Image: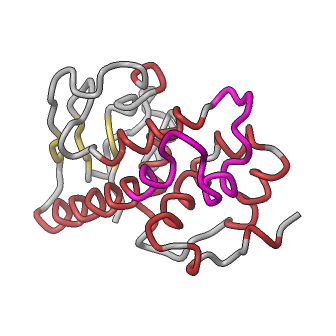
Amino acid sequence: MKFRLWPFLVLCSSTLASPLLEKRHSYSFVGCDSGQQNAINEILDDMEALATAAVKNSESGAPSAAFTAWFGDGTGQKISNENINTRFHKISIFKTSVPKKDVAFDCTEQSPCCKSGAGAVPACALDVVDTVKDEFGKTFTGRGYGQEVCLRYALKNPVSARRNADTHTLFATASYYGIGNWQTDPNKLN
């Protein structure tokens, strides 16, 4: 199923430091039949479940082995462990406390998703958190991908790992299902 999420800067980096529940907003559907609405709600429920597991696995204090495997050593990183945890927390409460703006899921093919209206593609995300939400939407529709690449980022280039939406999504999936479901054993990479 294809749908577009707008506005795209709902959970942008500028809102990460703001209070989560300033004002409760809503989400709505544009051009979606009841089946599409149900499918989107199921995706949101799945997304929140994965993000909740990621929050538990990335909370403050000493990072878990899984967190370090996916995001590398956080010492001195521009994107801190706390920042990553905050992103997962905001995604985990998306349906009950959408920050800043109302959100609409657009199921029409004619509606451009980018502000310019050019080169519209389904789910045109403009920042890390929105991209992660897009990737979460794909998690239950296909097999996980890119695990080894993402785990190698954490070893060789933690900055890339912390900016990569696939890494965030794969970490959340691994947090939810456990290490036994990983295709790549992070302990065997070097």
Figure check: 109 above or below 114:
below
Residue 184 located left or right of residue 57: right
Taking the spot 51% from the left edge, 48% from the top edge, the residue there is 58
Q: Nearer the viewer, residue 128 or 60?
A: 60
Asked which quadrant contains residue 147, the reply is bottom right
Spot occupied by residue 77 in the image (x, y as percentages of width and height): 71, 30
Question: In this figure, which colouring scheme has been used for the structure?
Answer: secondary structure
Spot occupied by residue 115 in the image (x, y as percentages of width and height): 42, 27
Figure check: 156 above or below 118:
below
Spot occupied by residue 158 in the image (x, y as percentages of width and height): 75, 43
Q: Nearer the viewer, residue 35 or 108?
A: 35
Q: Residue furthest right?
A: 190
Taking the spot 33% from the left edge, 54% from the top edge, the residue there is 3
| Number of marks in the rendered image | 0
Q: Nearer the viewer, residue 96 or 141?
A: 96
Taking the spot 32% from the left edge, 36% from the top edge, the residue there is 6
Q: Quadrant of the N terminus?
A: bottom left
Figure check: 106 above or below 177:
above
Taking the spot 21% from the left edge, 46% from the top edge, the residue there is 95
Q: Residue furthest front?
A: 61
Figure check: 160 above or below 51:
above
Q: Quadrant of the C terminus?
A: bottom right
Q: Nearer the viewer, residue 150 or 68?
A: 68
Asked which quadrant contains residue 8, the reply is top left
Magenta span of residues = 53-79
Spot occupied by residue 2 in the image (x, y as percentages of width and height): 36, 59
The answer to whether residue 85 is magenta is no
Residue 32 located left or right of residue 160: left
